[in-house]
């Protein structure tokens, strides 16, 4: 299993978690862990997911999640776990 990290940041609003989770379920991406918080009206979520069984390639998933984020006024990033870990060490 190769893990992926999904981050979502933006102004809090109804339906952010639902829309992201629905997209992932529709594309056969399994959520392994999820953490979210709201600080002073700003929403922040981090998910660990398994995209091995995804219906689409990683690049397409990433682009579509970014577009979903734009449609909600949020920033959504999808990164492979090894890239995320490398960036945190720099």
Image (cartoon, rainbow, N blue to C red):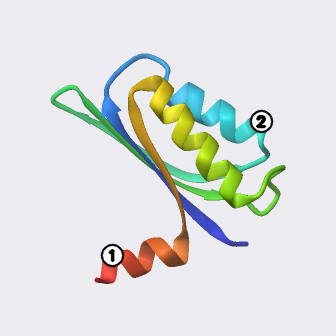
Quarter of the view holding residue 72: top left
Q: Would residue 45 be found to the left or right of residue 49 on screen? A: left
Q: Position of residue 90 (x, y in %)?
A: 28, 83
Specify few, some or many for label 2: CA neighbours under 10 Å numbering under 14, 14-19, or 20 or more. Answer: few
**Residue 46 % position (x, y):** 43, 50
The residue positioned 60% from the left and 47% from the top of the image is 63
Distance from the alpha carbon under mark 2 to that under mark 1: 30 Å
* Secondary element at image label 2: helix
Q: Residue at x 15, y 29 (%)?
A: 40
Front position in the image: 62 or 5? 62
Residue 32, numbered label? none
Q: Which mark is residue 88?
A: 1
The vertical placement of 17 against 33, above or below, is above
Residue 32, percent across and down? 61, 55
Q: Quadrant of residue 49?
A: bottom right
Q: Earlier in the sequence, mark 2 or mark 1?
A: 2
Q: Is residue 10 left or right of residue 18?
A: left
Residue at x 41%, y 81% (from the top left corner): 86
Asked if residue 54 is positioned above or below residue 3 in the image, the reply reads above
């Amino acid at each position: 299993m190769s893990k992926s990290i999904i981050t979502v940041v933006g102004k809090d609003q109804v339906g952010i978690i639902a829309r992201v989770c629905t997209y992932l379920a529709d594309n056969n991406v399994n959520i392994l862990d999820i953490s979210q918080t709201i600080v002073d009206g700003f929403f922040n979520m981090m998910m660990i997911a398994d995209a091995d069984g995804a219906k689409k390639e990683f690049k397409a998933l990433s682009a579509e999640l970014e577009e979903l984020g734009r449609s909600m006024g949020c920033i959504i990033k999808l990164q492979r776990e090894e890239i995320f870990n490398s960036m945190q060490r720099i």
